[in-house]
Amino acid sequence: MKYFPSLALGFWALLFISTSQAIVIEYTATDLTDINAGEDLWEYSYTVSDHTFSADTGFAIYFDFNLFDQLDFAPLAPNPDWDVITWAPDPFFGEDGSYDAYALFDSASLADPFTVSFVWLGDSTGPGAQNFELYDGFTFDILEEGNTSLLAGNNQPPSDVPEPATVTLMAFALWLIRRRTR
Protein backbone atom coordinates (compact mmCIF):
# COMPACT_ATOMS: atom_id res chain seq x y z
CA MET A 1 0.00 0.00 0.00
CA LYS A 2 2.89 2.37 0.54
CA TYR A 3 3.65 2.28 -3.24
CA PHE A 4 0.13 3.41 -4.21
CA PRO A 5 0.92 7.17 -4.48
CA SER A 6 3.94 6.42 -6.70
CA LEU A 7 1.90 4.14 -8.93
CA ALA A 8 -0.92 6.67 -9.21
CA LEU A 9 1.55 9.45 -10.07
CA GLY A 10 3.18 7.21 -12.69
CA PHE A 11 -0.22 6.37 -14.18
CA TRP A 12 -1.16 10.06 -14.51
CA ALA A 13 2.23 10.91 -16.00
CA LEU A 14 1.81 8.18 -18.63
CA LEU A 15 -1.71 9.36 -19.37
CA PHE A 16 -0.53 12.93 -20.04
CA ILE A 17 2.48 11.80 -22.05
CA SER A 18 0.41 9.48 -24.22
CA THR A 19 -2.17 12.17 -25.00
CA SER A 20 0.35 14.76 -26.16
CA GLN A 21 0.17 15.44 -29.88
CA ALA A 22 3.08 14.93 -32.20
CA ILE A 23 4.04 17.41 -34.89
CA VAL A 24 2.25 16.84 -38.18
CA ILE A 25 3.84 17.78 -41.50
CA GLU A 26 1.55 17.24 -44.48
CA TYR A 27 2.45 17.79 -48.11
CA THR A 28 1.08 18.30 -51.56
CA ALA A 29 3.28 17.53 -54.54
CA THR A 30 2.72 19.50 -57.75
CA ASP A 31 4.15 18.46 -61.11
CA LEU A 32 5.51 21.73 -62.56
CA THR A 33 6.21 22.57 -66.19
CA ASP A 34 9.63 21.18 -66.97
CA ILE A 35 12.25 23.79 -67.85
CA ASN A 36 15.02 21.50 -69.11
CA ALA A 37 14.45 18.52 -71.39
CA GLY A 38 14.75 15.21 -69.56
CA GLU A 39 14.13 16.70 -66.09
CA ASP A 40 10.91 16.20 -64.13
CA LEU A 41 10.36 19.41 -62.13
CA TRP A 42 8.12 19.26 -59.02
CA GLU A 43 7.25 21.32 -55.98
CA TYR A 44 6.39 20.26 -52.43
CA SER A 45 4.16 22.48 -50.33
CA TYR A 46 4.24 21.58 -46.62
CA THR A 47 1.67 22.42 -43.97
CA VAL A 48 2.96 22.13 -40.39
CA SER A 49 0.63 21.74 -37.39
CA ASP A 50 0.23 20.39 -33.86
CA HIS A 51 3.40 22.04 -32.58
CA THR A 52 4.31 25.44 -31.18
CA PHE A 53 7.84 26.35 -32.18
CA SER A 54 10.09 28.22 -29.79
CA ALA A 55 12.80 30.47 -31.15
CA ASP A 56 15.88 28.48 -32.17
CA THR A 57 14.02 25.25 -32.89
CA GLY A 58 13.21 23.93 -36.31
CA PHE A 59 12.57 21.01 -38.56
CA ALA A 60 14.45 19.34 -41.39
CA ILE A 61 12.80 17.32 -44.17
CA TYR A 62 15.10 14.91 -46.00
CA PHE A 63 15.39 14.32 -49.76
CA ASP A 64 16.73 10.86 -50.67
CA PHE A 65 19.76 11.20 -52.96
CA ASN A 66 18.42 8.36 -55.15
CA LEU A 67 15.11 10.13 -55.82
CA PHE A 68 15.72 13.89 -55.73
CA ASP A 69 18.05 16.38 -57.39
CA GLN A 70 18.43 20.14 -57.80
CA LEU A 71 16.58 21.37 -54.72
CA ASP A 72 15.73 25.05 -54.98
CA PHE A 73 18.95 26.56 -53.60
CA ALA A 74 17.22 29.74 -52.37
CA PRO A 75 13.69 28.87 -51.22
CA LEU A 76 11.58 31.70 -49.87
CA ALA A 77 10.64 31.67 -46.19
CA PRO A 78 6.88 31.36 -45.69
CA ASN A 79 6.90 34.52 -43.50
CA PRO A 80 9.38 36.62 -41.44
CA ASP A 81 9.20 34.20 -38.48
CA TRP A 82 11.32 31.64 -40.32
CA ASP A 83 14.75 31.20 -41.87
CA VAL A 84 14.88 28.42 -44.49
CA ILE A 85 17.76 26.82 -46.33
CA THR A 86 18.30 23.75 -48.48
CA TRP A 87 21.25 21.61 -49.36
CA ALA A 88 21.26 19.35 -52.36
CA PRO A 89 21.38 15.56 -52.27
CA ASP A 90 24.85 14.25 -53.11
CA PRO A 91 24.81 10.84 -54.83
CA PHE A 92 28.62 10.77 -55.00
CA PHE A 93 28.89 10.66 -51.19
CA GLY A 94 25.49 8.99 -50.68
CA GLU A 95 24.16 11.97 -48.71
CA ASP A 96 20.52 13.02 -48.65
CA GLY A 97 19.55 16.64 -49.20
CA SER A 98 17.43 18.65 -46.81
CA TYR A 99 14.91 21.46 -46.51
CA ASP A 100 15.56 23.12 -43.15
CA ALA A 101 13.20 25.62 -41.48
CA TYR A 102 14.48 27.44 -38.37
CA ALA A 103 12.16 29.45 -36.09
CA LEU A 104 13.47 32.96 -35.43
CA PHE A 105 10.81 33.84 -32.81
CA ASP A 106 8.76 32.10 -30.15
CA SER A 107 5.41 30.86 -31.48
CA ALA A 108 6.62 31.21 -35.07
CA SER A 109 3.65 31.42 -37.44
CA LEU A 110 2.60 28.25 -39.24
CA ALA A 111 -0.16 30.00 -41.20
CA ASP A 112 1.71 29.90 -44.52
CA PRO A 113 2.97 26.83 -46.41
CA PHE A 114 6.65 25.97 -46.71
CA THR A 115 7.54 25.30 -50.37
CA VAL A 116 10.50 23.96 -52.28
CA SER A 117 11.00 22.89 -55.90
CA PHE A 118 13.17 20.00 -57.05
CA VAL A 119 13.84 17.55 -59.86
CA TRP A 120 12.21 14.15 -59.35
CA LEU A 121 14.36 11.15 -60.34
CA GLY A 122 11.89 8.44 -59.34
CA ASP A 123 9.15 6.63 -61.20
CA SER A 124 6.05 8.04 -62.88
CA THR A 125 3.91 7.84 -59.72
CA GLY A 126 5.66 10.97 -58.46
CA PRO A 127 7.18 11.88 -55.10
CA GLY A 128 5.67 10.79 -51.79
CA ALA A 129 6.28 10.88 -48.05
CA GLN A 130 9.65 11.87 -46.60
CA ASN A 131 11.48 11.59 -43.28
CA PHE A 132 11.70 14.63 -41.04
CA GLU A 133 13.24 15.65 -37.72
CA LEU A 134 12.25 18.30 -35.23
CA TYR A 135 15.36 19.68 -33.51
CA ASP A 136 16.66 22.08 -30.88
CA GLY A 137 18.97 24.62 -32.54
CA PHE A 138 21.11 25.15 -29.43
CA THR A 139 21.77 21.58 -28.33
CA PHE A 140 21.19 19.95 -31.73
CA ASP A 141 19.07 17.35 -29.94
CA ILE A 142 16.48 15.58 -32.09
CA LEU A 143 13.17 16.23 -30.32
CA GLU A 144 11.00 14.18 -32.63
CA GLU A 145 11.20 12.15 -35.83
CA GLY A 146 8.53 11.13 -38.28
CA ASN A 147 7.31 11.01 -41.85
CA THR A 148 5.42 13.60 -43.81
CA SER A 149 1.93 12.57 -44.88
CA LEU A 150 -0.26 13.45 -47.82
CA LEU A 151 -2.51 16.42 -47.08
CA ALA A 152 -6.02 15.13 -46.39
CA GLY A 153 -8.34 15.47 -49.37
CA ASN A 154 -5.46 15.63 -51.84
CA ASN A 155 -5.91 13.29 -54.80
CA GLN A 156 -2.27 12.40 -55.20
CA PRO A 157 -0.23 10.84 -56.70
CA PRO A 158 -0.96 12.46 -60.04
CA SER A 159 -1.51 10.32 -63.09
CA ASP A 160 -2.11 10.58 -66.80
CA VAL A 161 -5.61 9.12 -66.45
CA PRO A 162 -8.25 11.67 -67.53
CA GLU A 163 -10.56 13.09 -64.88
CA PRO A 164 -14.07 11.56 -64.77
CA ALA A 165 -15.60 14.78 -66.15
CA THR A 166 -13.25 14.63 -69.13
CA VAL A 167 -14.15 11.00 -69.81
CA THR A 168 -17.87 11.83 -69.58
CA LEU A 169 -17.47 14.78 -71.96
CA MET A 170 -15.56 12.62 -74.45
CA ALA A 171 -18.20 9.88 -74.28
CA PHE A 172 -20.97 12.43 -74.86
CA ALA A 173 -19.11 13.87 -77.89
CA LEU A 174 -18.66 10.39 -79.36
CA TRP A 175 -22.36 9.65 -78.80
CA LEU A 176 -23.31 12.89 -80.63
CA ILE A 177 -21.01 12.08 -83.55
CA ARG A 178 -22.34 8.56 -83.77
CA ARG A 179 -25.94 9.78 -83.63
CA ARG A 180 -25.38 12.33 -86.43
CA THR A 181 -23.79 9.73 -88.73
CA ARG A 182 -26.83 7.41 -88.55
Image (tube, grey):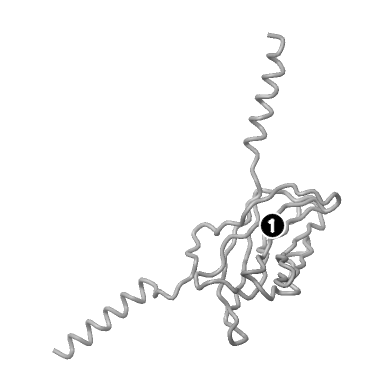
Tell me residue 19's x, y (percent). Answer: 62, 36
Tell me residue 44's x, y (percent). Answer: 62, 68
Please identify the quadrant where the N terminus is shown: top right
Q: Tell me the SS state at disc 1.
A: loop
State which quadrant residue 112 falls in. Answer: bottom right
Judged left or right of residue 170, residue 96 is right
The residue shown at (59%, 87%) is 37
State which quadrant residue 36 falls in. Answer: bottom right
Tell me residue 103's x, y (percent). Answer: 78, 57
Q: Residue furthest top?
A: 1
Q: Residue furthest bottom?
A: 181
Looking at the image, is 4 positioned above or below residue 167?
above
Judged left or right of residue 14, residue 123 is left
Q: Residue furthest right?
A: 138
Please identify the quadrant where the C terminus is shown: bottom left
The residue shown at (58%, 60%) is 129
Amino acid, disc 1:
Leu
The residue shown at (67%, 19%) is 8
The residue shown at (65%, 57%) is 131
In depth, the one of 44 and 140 nearer the eye is 140
How many numbered marks appear? 1
Q: Residues within 10 Å of mark 1 (few under 14, many from 20)?
A: some
Looking at the image, is 39 positioned above or below residue 109?
below
Tell me residue 164's x, y (percent). Answer: 36, 71
User: Which residue is label 1 attached to?
Assistant: 110
In depth, the one of 67 and 155 nearer the eye is 67
State which quadrant residue 71 falls in. Answer: bottom right
